Image (cartoon, rainbow, N blue to C red):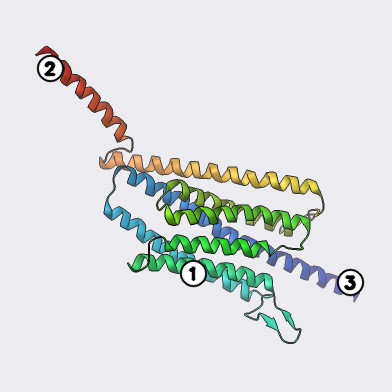
Amino acid sequence: MLRRGKKECEQSEELDRMANFKGHALPGSFFLLFGLWWSVKYSLQYLSQKVNKKSHRAYCFQRVDAIEGGIKILFSLIGMLAEQFVPDGPHLYLYSGEKHDWVKLMNWQHTTMYLFYGLSGVVDVFTFISQVVPQGLDRLMLAMAVFAEGCLFYYHVLHRPMLDQHIHSLLLIAIFAGAGSTLLEVFLRDNIVLEMFRAHITIVQGTWFWQIGVVLFQPWGGPMWDENDHSNIMFLTMCFFWHWAAAVAILAVNYSLAYCCLQRLRRGSGEPYINLGVRQQKCDSSSQAAFLNGSDEE
């Protein structure tokens, strides 16, 4: 009887551990996908507009922003439903009258995070379909969503073990950096540096969510990390900046691929290259020299 009870307890702990891991892997996957997509989209948008600023291309990218908003709403709904209706979820109950206690506040905090990103998606869609929406409101709403995420996670880990607090505090660095850069985009629209930095920070958020899930919950088995060992704190700090460097490398690769693809398309269609300005300057200087030589001969 005792052996059966112990076995059931271990199974329950295993289920809780996997549920907590999935709770970090799901938002991590969403952030990673958006970060990778933004790194490609903004590279293509910047490089294509650098040579040929056609209105229909700008309109196409605006349509992409609206579709992106719809996907953001879909991802947010999936996240909220997953947090609420997993087997051990709160099922929309916030307070238990019988136990006189809050119900699964961790799930509710994740739900609130998804809610703000869903609102950001709604503003993205309305920015495209209505001229009444002020320009920059979509970036402001996204900055608010990222800031809300940071505040929720700051109070998410108070009075938790040292390792848990530290690994989430590293995530807060990326979150608040993303909130600040996105807020700057309200006033500096279509700034490629800020846009690529947002993509970079979003990739870091995505990979670090996965790192948190692996470290704290060991989904594939193995010994748990010692939460009071300072060496683990030092390693994870170093590991966080490895994620940072990997995201920079991803941005560089995607930007280079976007450049090569656009150059190949322009060669096939006969459009001017991106470095046309340099070539044109050389042509102008050579033609000017030829003209002066002709004048001297006359």
Which residue carries the number 2 mark? 295
- First reached walking from the N terminus: tag 1 or tag 2: 1
Q: CA distance from mark 3 to mark 2?
A: 104 Å
Which residue carries the number 1 mark? 119
Element carrying mark 3: helix
Q: CA distance from mark 1 to mark 2?
A: 68 Å
* Residue 239 in the image: above or below residue 132: above
Q: Is residue 122 visible?
A: yes
Numbered tag placed on residue 36 in the rendering: none
Dot 3 surroundings within 10 Å: few (below 14), some, or many (20 or more)?
few
* Residue 55 in the image: above or below residue 114: above
Residue type marked 1: Leu
Numbered tag placed on residue 3 in the rendering: 3
Q: Position of residue 219 (x, y in %)?
A: 71, 59
Q: Position of residue 269 (x, y in %)?
A: 26, 42
At 24% from the left edge and 24% from the top edge, which residue is drawn? 285
Residue type marked 3: Arg
At 56% from the left edge and 46% from the top edge, which residue is drawn? 247
* Residue 236 located left or right of residue 128: right
At 44% from the left edge and 49% from the top edge, which residue is drawn? 40
Residue 294: quadrant of the picture: top left
Q: Nearer the viewer, mark 3 or mark 1?
A: 1
